[in-house]
Amino acid sequence: MRIFGCVFFAAITIVLIYFLDNQLTLNGSKTPRFGFFLSPQKGFWQNAEPANANFNGNFNFTQLLGKTEVYFDERLVPHVYAENEHDAWFVQGYLHAKFRLWQMDFQTYAAAGRLSEIMGDSSSGTNFLKIDKFFRRLGMVYGAEKTLHAMESDPQTKSACDAYTAGVNTYINSLDEKDYPLEYKLLNYRPELWTNMKSALLVKYMSYDLAGYEQDFERTNAKALLTKAQYEALFPYVEDSTQLIITDALPKIKDQPVVTIPSTADSLYFNYKALVAPLDSAIKPDKNNGSNNWAVAGSKTKSGRPILCNDPHLGLNLPSLWYEMQISTPAFNVYGVSLPGAPNILIGFNNNCAWGLTNAERDVRDYYEIKFRDSTMQQYWYNGVWQNAEMRNEIIKIRSKPNDTEHIAITVFGPVMYDPHYPDKLHTNKYYACHWQAHNESNELGSILKLLRAKNYTDYLEATSTFECPSQNFVFADKPGDIAIHQAGKFPALWYRQGDFIMPGFDSSYAWQAYIPDSLQPVMHNPERGFVSSANQAPYDTKIYPYYIPAYFSLYRGWLINRNLSFMQNITTDDMERLQTSFYNLLAEKALPVLLNNVSFSKLNKTEKNYLTVVSSWNLENDSASIGATVFKLWMDSSISKIYGDELNSSGLPVPNVEPAALLKNIEKDSAKLFADDISTSEKETLEEDITAAFKSIVPVLEKAKRDGVIEWGKFKDGGIAHLLKIPAFSRLHVNAGGGVNIINAFGKDHGPSWRMIVELTDDINAYGVYPGGQSGNPGSKYYDDFINTWAAGKYYRIHLYDKQTISSQKNNLGVMIFVK
């Protein structure tokens, strides 16, 4: 009996050791190693940060050249004072790693197509292997290699990156297992050393997020389903009411590149009717990745000095996309937000000027059909001969499983993204190559490093002129009174509709023939109207611009911003705060009268009439308590679906969404009658019947929302800021705030103003900022998400470009770190 007891307890011990020392599969996900994760000495307990934690430290590192002092203010924003630039970038790398290591590491795993290494091929319903294959085949690593070469070919950029990487790795090498960020413990892996390649991957991921959106397959399907007149009505080039970014006349230049439309364009491109479907149509950056920025001249402000404003609209996550800081060196003194993972202050201001960014929305990613000699993909047909393809073998490591290897052919256009081994949904066995500006060698990080040194308009223009992809609208203002805006990027010179659809890649006739000269990408400098602005709208008058500009332009935010700035005088920073957080719905101002004019009131029941009264008496503000905003959003979406859905959805394949502006224009021009009749029924429907039916269809949704207590707009759209791993306990969900798509304050479901900044260029700069997160990436820290309530309420923090003496005397600082050699 005694032996049985010993054997029994020994067996129990062995089983416990196994279960505590190994990851288990539970509901499709892997658990952490519970023995390590629950260990009081090394587990998650060590990530609980005391509420009164201080951030003091004295560090001696041989990589340093001098002394650097870091003062953490009351919001944990570091103010870095370095004796030289090398040490400034080293310390930035160290601080990024200390406060955001897992975030920056995880994002570069994603960009490199390596998530399967740490997550397995799938987990919790997410197919990580599919995501990895997508990014490998898109050419993210291929493009990052070229970016790295450009970065390291520029001495200034290489020096900054080398110092930054050394700072990150110095922090990583100082870590014991107990110090690992919580996510490493949950996922049971450890940080790997940083490299300059990882910084290049971060830049490339920014290119994907901001210049990777395209609808070539979707538009090809729409072209096959619609007549030419229908297509042009639904997907116009640019809306007539667009407020252009650059209103100045275009310069006249000699030797302007001439682009030639292929002789086969009608038969092989415009009139070619074929349905296509990418395998991964769901993997796309957010179409609404955009922003607002503007600068007003001193002639319109109360202080007589320019005011610059910026709020980039991006995906909202925790840890936050941004890390706020000041960096002061003998060469520059700059404050703003940085992207953890590279040496930078991307948006901000220095002693002399301020700058901000919005996305240009230009489509610089096209697909070409390729003809290979055989299934080995060694040779492809191009310009009448068989050309040799370069082959890349991309090895994807998969946790606890054998590796997967993607054999990717590289053509003159770029990597072959789709082939029989990675087919489209229709399994046509066709080959499609991706031609993307982000594949080309360029050094955007170098442009940013120049910009933060800018002292005047000339410096700003020199810095932005080398920024290629993702193309951005750089707004600028300085203390002497200059304001300007420049759409910076490298764009192909295209003929009308080139690249909207999949193109034949059998010869060079459909290839990009030239790039648009810099002189045809003008800057608007000190305009007479007293302001410059952009909100992702068209840059130039497309009726006279010599080249086609494929893009996904926004309309209503830019329109409303310009309308406000045009009449505003004696502007203050308080005025700019109110404009930047405005909930006014200009789309509803234009659309609601049209909808109300076409609804048949007599065909509505009592409940439906009550909701019609709600929306017709709505004040057009998308604030959190509004019910009218909820009714309008549902009605608008339902009307578009009712009128156009039968034509566009008949194939069951992806097609572009019809924008509200297209519906309004079609109703105004009476061309909505092209679509009003539902082709799936025998009756002939009218526009009035469609809009009435659309309204009736949303009432059950509204009634359910009312019963559930979520009919008010803030609760209905249910915005939130999720952790990158979508762990609810690490997220701030159900953030009840107004906003939405087409609203200046663009907070939606999980997307919106990721950083709000207002800078008045007075002698002592008067600046304000806020982002929806916190400085720490540790969910166990009080500084993880402490800015969110302020941001959601439309409030700001005063931000300071302190001198060292002033910051060192602040009584509410959270700590001081000293770095010396």
Image (tube, rainbow, N blue to C red):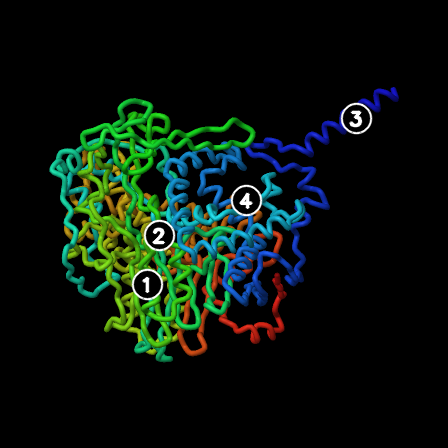
Callout in the foreground (1, 4): 1
Residue at left offset 68%, top offset 31%: 19
Q: Which residue is mark 2?
A: 631
Query: Left or right of 261: which side holds 815?
Result: right
Q: Does residue 821 sit above or below 350 in this rendering?
A: above
What residue do we see at 40% from left, 47% from top?
149
Compare marks 2 and 3 and give the one earlier in the sequence.
3
Q: CA distance from mark 1 to mark 4?
A: 44 Å
Instruction: Give the quadrant of residue 409.
Output: top left
Structural crowding at the residue carrying mark 3, measured as other residues with C-alpha within 10 Å and reported as few (<14), some (14–19) or many (≥20): few
Distance Cα–Cα, label 2 vs label 1: 48 Å
- Residue at the location (55% across, 50% down)? 101
Between the residue at mark 3 and the residue at mark 4, the CA separation in whole angstroms equals 37 Å
Q: Amino acid at mark 3?
A: Ala
Label pair 2/1, CB-CB below 8 angstroms: no
Q: Residue flagged by tag 2: what amino acid is it? A: Val
**Of residues 171 and 586, which is closer to you in this image?**
171
> Does residue 321 show up?
no
Q: Of circles 1 and 3, which is in front?
A: 1
How many numbered markers are drawn?
4
- Tell me the residue that label 4 is attached to: 727
Element on which disc 1 rests: helix
Is the Cβ of the residue at disc 2 closer than 8 Å to that at disc 4? no
Q: Secondary structure at mark 4?
A: loop
- Find the distance from the CA under tag 2 to the CA under tag 3: 66 Å
Q: Are marks 1 and 4 in contact (CB under 8 Å)?
A: no
